[in-house]
Image: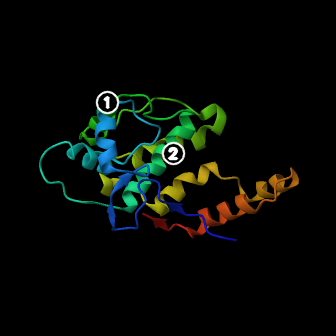
Amino acid sequence: EGRFRLADLDAAAVLGEEITEFMGMPWEVWVPNVQIGPWPTAVPSPEHARHLHSRWSLAAVPPLLASREADWFQFGVLILEVICYRPVLAGRPGREVLADLAAQGPLRVPECSAASRLGEACAVSLQALAGALLSKNASARPGALDSLAALRPCLPAPSRLHEHADRGGDGRAAGRAAEVAEDGEGAGVAG
């Protein structure tokens, strides 16, 4: 059995190395396209957006380095999209999305409720976690242990794992998720 890991949800780069692309395309491709077209489904971290936004100026731009915090932001986007059942920023004009992500104020995201689908405790915990992970301040985003703790209300209780296995599931994934949530193992993050 392997460990659960959050890995590479922003740009493809090794932790601490320079990021030279977004969604597999070099910066040079994105600058003109993002300015004129609607935003795609992917949502960059605010750090990534600030970098892309700053490339439109004539000033020299320092390199953007891959970080765990950018991946945790992406995890927050995934959680919010699960809660809302829709992409967070897709379809808005590219300049508007980048300006929103790069600005100091809170990120404008759709309001939605998942309590009926996920249960009240799970929905509240996921919404709080997503809100914290979507912080524009990278150092304020929770890391692995805090995120795992916030996910606990959404994991099946250990006694319910056997029910899952009885319904045709093998129980390995849910069982391993419960183990990870209990001891914090597998909380590694790759940039």
| 169 relative to 185 in the view: left or right | right
**Residue indicated by mark 1:** 36
Which amino acid, by three-letter code, is at mark 2?
Answer: Leu
Mark 1 is surrounded, within 10 Å at the Cα level, by few (under 14), some (14 to 19) or many (20 or more) other residues, namely few
> Mark 1 is on which residue type?
Ile
User: Tag 1's secondary structure?
Assistant: helix
Q: Quadrant of residue 116?
A: top right
* Residue 95 sits above or below residue 146 on the image: above
189 or 164: nearer the viewer: 189
Horizontal side of residue 32 vs 176, given as left or right: left
Q: Is residue 100 above or below residue 25?
A: above
Relative to 72, is 92 above or below? above
**Residue 177 in the image, given as x and y percentages of width and height:** 65, 61
Q: Quadrant of the C terminus?
A: bottom left
Q: Residue at x 60, y 34 (%)?
A: 115
- What residue do we see at 61% from left, 50% from top? 153
Look at 38% across and 46% down and name the residue there.
Answer: 44
- Work out whether residue 65 or residue 138 is closer to the camera in this orientation and state it: 65
Residue tagged 2: 78
In the image, 11 versus 176, the foreground residue is 11
The front one of 91 and 147 is 91
Q: Position of residue 150 (x, y in %)?
A: 52, 52
Precedes in sequence: disc 2 or disc 1:
1
Which is more foreground, mark 2 or mark 1?
1
Tag 2 and tag 1, C-beta contact below 8 Å: no
At horizontal 71% and vertical 55% (from top left) the residue drawn is 157
Query: Can the viewer see residue 106 in this picture?
Result: no
Q: Classify mark 2: residues with Cα within 10 Å, few (<14), some (14-19) or many (20+).
A: some
- Tell me residue 67's x, y (percent): 36, 62
> Whole-percent x and y of residue 164?
81, 52
